[in-house]
């Protein structure tokens, strides 16, 4: 195609910039939302892991029970700005869902905390692959 120049040339100055801005808005906005949500999920996972670590450290102590461990985790979640009523706390002794007060020295105690993704996302949980954000599963050995 030949480009015309001179007084009869059509005025298209800036048309490419406008077209680029329109097209990129459909690409960049979802990408930005996705980065925000992914960053939030990583932040929440770290905070849940901190609460889980605190609960697991308490769980391996003699005299601990599931209720004291759960209360410790709930206090940590509240301090981090989460509603502990939304949290799911899983405490296992040697892979069994029993009270940690029954654990013997050397038994493995594992603790995991989960929150629904809908309660922790900034925008919408559209970019998360699961319905919840889970902490790492921490496993520690019961002290004597």
Image (cartoon, rainbow, N blue to C red):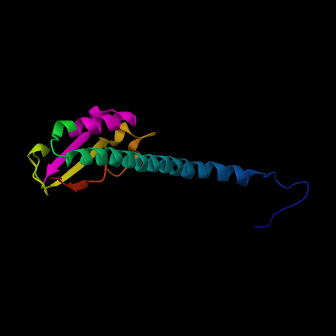
Residue sitting at the far bottom: 1
Query: In terms of image quadrants, where is residue 82?
Result: top left
Could you tell me residue 63's position as x and y percent? 15, 41
**103 or 6: nearer the eye?**
103
The part of the chain drawn in magenta is 69-93
Residue sitting at the far right: 7
Instruction: From the viewer's perspective, tell me whether residue 117 is left or right of residue 138.
Output: right
Tag count: 0
**Can you say whether 81 is above or below 129 in the image?**
above
Could you tell me residue 4's position as x and y percent? 84, 62
Instruction: From the viewer's perspective, tell me whether residue 86 is left or right of residue 97.
Output: right
Name which residue lies at 15% across and 50% down. Answer: 92
**126 or 99: nearer the eye?**
99
**22 or 126: nearer the eye?**
126
**Can you say whether 95 is above or below 102 in the image?**
below
Name which residue lies at 30% across and 49% down. Answer: 53
Give the quarter of the figure containing the N terminus: bottom right
Instruction: From the viewer's perspective, tell me whether residue 103 is left or right of residue 37.
Output: left
89 within the magenta span: yes
130 within the magenta span: no
Could you tell me residue 95's position as x and y percent? 13, 55
Residue sitting at the far front: 144
Name which residue lies at 20% across and 49% down. Answer: 60
Q: Is residue 104 visible?
A: yes
Could you tell me residue 90's position as x and y percent? 20, 45
Q: Is residue 131 visible?
A: no
Query: In terms of image quadrants, where is residue 89?
Result: top left
**95 or 13: nearer the eye?**
95
């Amino acid at each position: 195609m030949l480009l015309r120049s001179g007084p009869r040339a059509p005025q298209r100055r800036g048309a490419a910039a406008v077209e680029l801005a329109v097209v990129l808005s459909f690409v960049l906005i979802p990408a930005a939302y996705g980065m925000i949500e992914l960053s939030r999920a990583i932040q929440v996972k770290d905070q849940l892991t901190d609460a889980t670590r605190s609960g697991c450290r308490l769980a391996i102590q003699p005299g601990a029970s599931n209720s004291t461990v759960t209360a410790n985790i709930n206090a940590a979640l509240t301090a981090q700005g989460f509603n502990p009523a939304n949290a799911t706390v899983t405490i296992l002794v040697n892979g069994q869902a029993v009270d940690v007060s029954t654990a013997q020295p050397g038994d493995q105690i594992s603790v995991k905390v989960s929150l629904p993704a809908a309660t922790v996302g900034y925008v919408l949980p559209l970019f998360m692959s699961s319905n919840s954000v889970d902490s790492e599963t921490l496993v520690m050995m019961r002290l004597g």
